[in-house]
Image (cartoon, grey):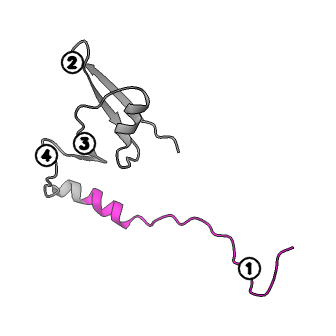
Amino acid sequence: GIAKAERIEVEKISSDISRFKLTLAEGKNREVRRMCEQVGIEVLDLRRIQYGQIFLGPLPSGKFREPFMEEKSFFEKILRKPKKKSPRSPKPKRGVQKR
């Protein structure tokens, strides 16, 4: 499907540089870069600042931190959530042909 941001905030840094904050419902690999490319925006730097209800703060690229106690319940809720299965049509019985 077509990717779209739920929310966009723009901060003008200079005459030719702006900072954007994009909120996505679901982010796929390189999705923000592709969205910007489609509208002619060159991405110089890209940082994730929040994941769901978890604010990452000044976390260096490629690093992690242990979740705070309040954040652990967010992850537990996600992990407990059952995956939605797509409805399947019943398989035809062997030896029976559809006409």
Residue indicated by mark 4? 59
Kind of residue at badge 4: Leu
Sequence-wise, the earlier of marks 2 and 4 is: 2
Q: Quadrant of residue 34?
A: top left
In the image, residue 63 lies at what x, y percent? 13, 53
Between the residue at mark 3 and the residue at mark 1, the CA separation in whole angstroms equals 48 Å
Residue indicated by mark 2? 13
Kind of residue at badge 2: Ile
Residue density around tag 4, few if under 14, some if 14–19, many if 20 or more, within 10 Å: few
Residue density around tag 3, few if under 14, some if 14–19, many if 20 or more, within 10 Å: few
- Tag 1 and tag 4, C-beta contact below 8 Å: no
Between the residue at mark 3 and the residue at mark 4, the CA separation in whole angstroms equals 9 Å
- Tag 3 and tag 4, C-beta contact below 8 Å: no
Kind of residue at badge 1: Pro
**Residue range corresponding to the magenta coloring:** 73-99
Sequence-wise, the earlier of marks 2 and 1 is: 2
What mark, if any, has residue 48 been given in the picture? 3
Whether residue 63 is in magenta: the answer is no
Residue density around tag 1, few if under 14, some if 14–19, many if 20 or more, within 10 Å: few
In the image, residue 52 lies at what x, y percent? 31, 48
